[in-house]
Amino acid sequence: MIRLLLIEDHTILRESLALMLSKGNIKIVAHCASAFEAMKIIDQETLSCVLLDLSLPDRDGIELIKAIRLKKSGLPVLVLSMYPEEQFALRALKAGASGYLNKSSPISTLTEAIEQASQGKKYITPAVAAVMANDLDSFREGGGHEILSDREHQYMMWAATGLTLTEIAEKMRVSPKTVSVYRARTLDKMKLPTTAALVSYAIKSGLTT
């Protein structure tokens, strides 16, 4: 029996997923809406797999993957996200996720991914495989947003939505001065002159929804 923890902050979606997945050899041990609740459950329960949404109210999803892997290195984590693979799939995999699926995926694909991850295997969809191939090409060319750190990448994504420096600081829970450092490092690494150029890059690269 696969013992699954479901982390999703939208109640209707979380309860619907719990209902649809509670079939066959999958048992939903618990489901919750926050990273704080998730870490308590991971401490208390014996789990086979975690299914995680990246958009949580109290913690960045990529950071949560790292925290889970640090606490329970052998516990597989699958990401189920509304964000396109181009935005976060590689970062999730590099953080330790066993797979990345878009929320448009059919339930049969999700079930297959959970079963495969629970066996200690990676689950790579064709869309993620394409992103990985593009990343390899970018690495060979010496450019691309994948050279950014997680925090710099977060800054770029928030900036691309039109948020101000102060608003981004609130989202990232750091000071505006710290965000200014992320901005400077991001522009330097990307060889871009302004934030407007960075936003243009994000849009042209399909990184915005």
Image (cartoon, rainbow, N blue to C red):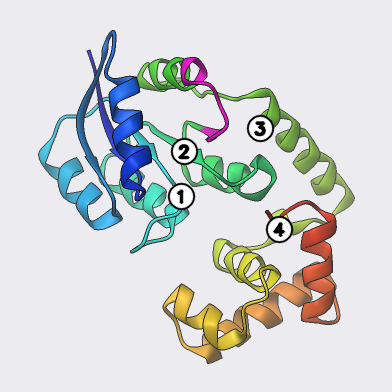
* Between 156 and 160, the one nearer to me in the picture: 160
Mark sitting earlier along the chain (1/2): 1
Quadrant containing the N terminus is: top left
Dot 1 lies on which element? Answer: loop
Q: Which mark is residue 128?
A: 3
In front: label 4 or label 3: 3
Q: How far is disc 4 from disc 2 in space, using C-alphas? A: 21 Å
Frontmost residue, 30 versus 89: 30
Q: Residues within 10 Å of mark 4 (few under 14, many from 20)?
A: some
Residue placed under numbered mark 4 in the picture: 147
Q: CA distance from mark 1 to mark 2?
A: 7 Å
**Which of marks 2 and 4 precedes in the sequence?**
2
Per the rendering, the mark at residue 79 is: 2
**Which residue corresponds to mark 1?**
54
How many angstroms separate mark 3 from mark 1 (CA)? 16 Å
Kind of residue indicated by mark 1:
Leu
Q: Secondary structure at mark 3?
A: helix
Taking the view exactly as shown, the residue that stands out farthest to the left is 44
Q: Earlier in the sequence, mark 4 or mark 3?
A: 3
Of the residues under marks 4 and 1, which one precedes in the sequence? 1
What is the CA distance from the residue labelled 4 to the residue labelled 1?
Answer: 20 Å
Q: Is residue 49 above or below residue 84?
A: above
Q: Amino acid at mark 2?
A: Val
- The range drawn in magenta is 100-109
Q: Which mark is residue 173?
A: none
Q: Secondary structure at mark 2?
A: strand
x, y percent for residue 78? 43, 33
**CB atoms of marks 1 and 2 within 8 Å:** yes
